[in-house]
Image (tube, rainbow, N blue to C red):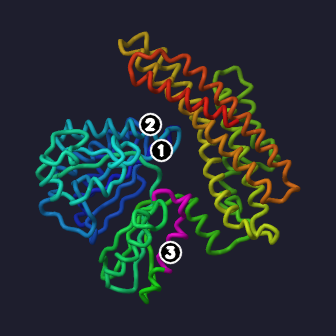
């Protein structure tokens, strides 16, 4: 697998004809793209394809998938429980490794423009790629579905697409493309056919009508049962187990029970670890207690019989080697990740103890957030080195290209964004570590002090890299100038927080 990975989870309006889905998947099979999963649902009449791959390859794969869907799917004859507006209904890009959400926004805009140009399908941008706040929410764009958009797109300015003419493709409709964080499609089946109950529960659980943050929900009749169909847009802040317990409690109000649940597509391992910890009530649970996690760490060299030194020594030696990468940016990210790890350890050691029972919920939320920050900062170790290498490549290619300056600025912007993200993560880790002092075992204050010191080192190092890269940008457009200005403001604010 490559070092830069993007996930794409296109949803197509076909869940009954396996041959059509096979053809769509086949169209997306190109070098550098890997098929992780395919789900077909006849009741929803919808399929979800999960791909992962290199940025350029996965963009082309998504475009080809949309084109093949337009050939095979006729929305004028389509019926199913799930709302839809296009043969290729929604195409989200999700950062996995070595890329940022901003990178995925750029991909979404490129893909949207290409879909419109190649297939004459109007495209709307949503979530992080949305051009207006109203279009961040997919439901706002898809309101009225294919038929409603078809009737209004030419006359209602609010329906004007981001790419393409204001008219739907006669059979393929319109497509929504965007960039977002990892989403869990999670459905709960009830022991009743009364879909009105599922709709009431969905109204209670979804955020837009007063429910849980980062939850979208609707009620459907599926396989002879009422189903609460949900999208969890940030499972680390609103975990799966909390959603299930909420649905179970609401169902009891109507005298019904959940009989099963399902995952559509894939689910991160961390989400299942959170659920296991919640339902099993394991004291001082940590993901390293899982056999496969420990084995993976040993096999990857993160820990060894030879002691802790064996795990970190290769990285230190890489830093000492006479090569430009890894350098100070990677070291800053590693320092921030260690800070998050230390603070997480302190919180975990206090959670579950009688003396800190009143802080149980706060500690659990803190541990989850620190785990997320730790993973983000670890990813930035390689991302920083990759960004530097991209800058060097851009300088080298500039000699042979008339658009060399533009490529150099784009690479420098990415090389600025990575350490800016590290700086933001480091500030948050330091703030969390400070908040942990009064609610954790005082004998572990030295660990928190070390965590804060490491976070400050990460911040200073990251901001130094930001400054160097910003100074190297030679703005040749208003977009460049806006980026430099905004980045300097963010850096100054982070420095003030230090």
The CA distance from mark 3 to mark 2 is 35 Å
Residue depicted at x 12% and y 47%: 155
Residue at 75% over, 33% down: 316
Q: Secondary structure at mark 2?
A: helix
Residue at the (80%, 72%) spot, across then down: 354
Task: Say which of 240 and 72 sits in front.
Answer: 240
> How far across and how far down the image is residue 260, in percent?
45, 78
Q: Position of residue 347 (x, y in %)?
A: 75, 58
Left or right: 174, with 90 as reference point: left
Residue found at the very far bottom of the displayed protein: 255
Which numbered dot is residue 246? Answer: 3
Residue 245 inside the magenta-drawn segment = yes
Q: Which residue is mark 1?
A: 95
Q: Nearer the viewer, residue 382 or 491?
A: 491
Q: Give the mark nearest the N terminus, 3 or 2.
A: 2
Residue 50: quarter of image? bottom left
Above or below: residue 491 compared with residue 475: below
Residues in magenta, as a range: 233-249
Residue 104 sits in quarter: top left
């Amino acid at each position: 697998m490559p070092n830069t990975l993007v996930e794409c989870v296109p949803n197509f309006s076909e869940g009954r004809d396996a041959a059509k889905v096979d053809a769509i998947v086949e169209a997306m099979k190109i070098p550098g793209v890997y098929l992780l999963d395919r789900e077909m649902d006849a009741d929803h009449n919808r399929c979800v394809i999960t791909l992962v791959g290199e940025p350029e390859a996965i963009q082309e794969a998504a475009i080809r998938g949309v084109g093949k869907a337009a050939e095979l799917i006729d929305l004028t004859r389509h019926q199913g429980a799930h709302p839809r507006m296009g043969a290729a209904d929604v195409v989200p890009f999700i950062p996995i490794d070595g890329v940022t959400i901003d990178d995925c926004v750029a991909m979404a805009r490129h893909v949207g423009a290409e879909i419109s140009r190649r297939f004459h399908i109007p495209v709307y941008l949503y979530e992080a790629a949305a051009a207006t706040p109203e279009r961040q929410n997919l439901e706002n764009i898809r309101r009225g579905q294919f038929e409603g958009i078809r009737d209004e797109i030419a006359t209602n300015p609010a329906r004007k697409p981001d790419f393409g003419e204001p008219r739907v493709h006669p059979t393929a409709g319109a497509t929504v493309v965007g960039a977002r964080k990892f989403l869990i499609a999670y459905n709960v089946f009830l022991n009743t056919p009364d879909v009105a109950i599922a709709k009431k529960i969905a109204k209670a659980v979804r955020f837009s009508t007063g429910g849980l943050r980062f939850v979208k929900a609707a009620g459907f009749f599926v396989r002879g049962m009422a189903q609460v169909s949900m999208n969890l847009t940030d499972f680390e802040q609103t975990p799966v187990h909390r959603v299930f317990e909420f649905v179970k409690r609401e169902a009891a109000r109507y005298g019904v029970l959940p009989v099963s649940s399902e995952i559509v597509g894939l689910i991160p391992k961390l989400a299942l670890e959170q659920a296991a910890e919640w339902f099993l009530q394991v004291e001082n649970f940590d993901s390293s207690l899982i056999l496969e996690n420990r084995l993976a760490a040993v096999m990857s060299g993160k820990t060894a019989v030879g002691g802790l030194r064996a795990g970190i020594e290769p990285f230190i030696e890489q830093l000492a080697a006479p090569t430009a990468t890894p350098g100070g940016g990677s070291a800053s990210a590693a320092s921030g990740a260690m800070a998050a790890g230390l603070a997480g350890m302190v919180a975990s050691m206090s959670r579950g103890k009688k003396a800190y029972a009143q802080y149980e919920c706060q500690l659990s939320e803190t541990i989850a957030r620190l785990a997320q920050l730790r993973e983000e900062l670890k990813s930035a170790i390689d991302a920083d080195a990759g960004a530097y290498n991209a800058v060097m490549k851009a300088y080298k290619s500039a000699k042979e290209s008339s658009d060399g300056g533009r490529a150099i600025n784009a690479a420098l912007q990415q090389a600025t964004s990575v350490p800016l993200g590290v700086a933001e993560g480091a500030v948050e880790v330091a703030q969390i570590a400070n908040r942990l002092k009064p609610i954790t075992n005082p004998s572990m204050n030295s660990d928190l002090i070390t965590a804060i010191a490491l976070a400050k080192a990460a911040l200073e190092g990251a901001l130094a890299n930001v400054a160097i890269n910003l100074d190297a940008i030679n703005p040749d457009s208003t977009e460049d100038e806006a980026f430099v200005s905004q980045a300097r403001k963010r850096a100054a604010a982070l420095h003030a927080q230090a």
